[in-house]
Amino acid sequence: MTSRQLWNAIEILHGGVYFAPDAKARYAEIGLKGYWMGYFASRAAALGTPGPELVVATFQGFAPRLVHRAIPDAWTFADREAVLSARYALARDLLEPVAGAATELAPQLRAVLRGVDWAGKPLAAAHADLPPSPDPVVDFWQSVTALREYRGDCHVAVLTAAGLGGTAANALAAATGWAWFADQREMRGWSEQEWQGAIDGLVTRGWVTPDGQGTDTGRAARNQLEDATDRVVAAGLDREATSRLVTLEARLVEVAREWADAHPALAGRSQRSS
């Protein structure tokens, strides 16, 4: 079975594209307006030119109104291929400090994708289905991204099976130390009223206190959600893919560490606080 450390390394190597200082400007050059339009369009472009409800469904965790302010308008401002090209160029520049390692690992990670069961993982499947890049550094990032979204899709399935919608999932993460940001509510676009409603629901489960602090039961439940995600992830990898990832783990962790050393400010935002 693959380790949480491996998936954290994959998260780090993938996530820098969202926090790069020039990300907003890069997407503005092709016509997109504002940070969130660049974020939603670039991440969703693998799906084609999806409408807002498909983005809400596949991304999970973002307030629908935040998505609706960016999608579908993004597709009237920028061509999908231009969005993908800008995203790849951004990733390529960010990976320059580890370009040699990325070139070395690209074919091995691409081979991993052949052993993944994409059923029920739409966002990951869409990324895996994109044409491989002739640039091995970009191809490395494409494979990393498909794997990152694979675990993400598995996690969304676990959250929804547990009866946690986007607001509740974020509120529980914030209460138990799993949140991406200190201002998780604002970053994901939820109103104070919506957030409080989610907390009220979590209080009835005994997972948080009325003031939004995680209980021992809530922390245990959140850990169990991660464990369940690990099991779903493992179930969708065939033996060869699992073996390849286990073999690559130490090298990917090393490369993620090298990348983090080169981009310390971005690395801190590309992984959870816990």
Image (tube, rainbow, N blue to C red):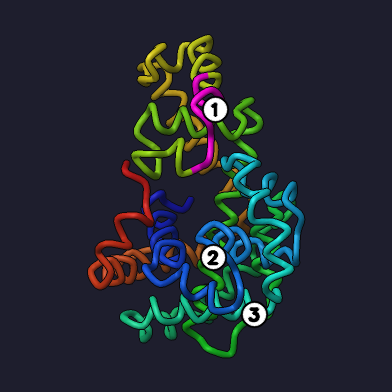
Instruction: Classify mark 3: helix, strand or loop.
Output: helix
Mark 2 or 1, closer to the camera: 1
Question: Which amino acid type is marked by label 3?
Answer: Ala
Do the residues bearing badges 3 and 1 touch, measured as CB atoms within 8 Å?
Answer: no
Q: CA distance from mark 2 to mark 3?
A: 18 Å
Is residue 163 one of those drawn in magenta?
A: no
Question: How dense is the environment of label 1, judged by Cα within 10 Å: few (below 14), some, or many (20 and up)?
Answer: many
Instruction: Classify mark 2: helix, strand or loop.
Output: helix
Residue 247 pos. (x, y %): 42, 67
Label 2 belongs to which residue? 145
Is residue 191 one of those drawn in magenta?
A: yes
Q: CA distance from mark 2 to mark 1?
A: 26 Å
108 sits to left or right of 121: left
Label 3 belongs to which residue? 82
- Which span of residues is magenta-colored? 188-196
Residue shown at the point (70%, 44%) measured from the top left: 57
Label 1 belongs to which residue? 168
236 sits to left or right of 6: right
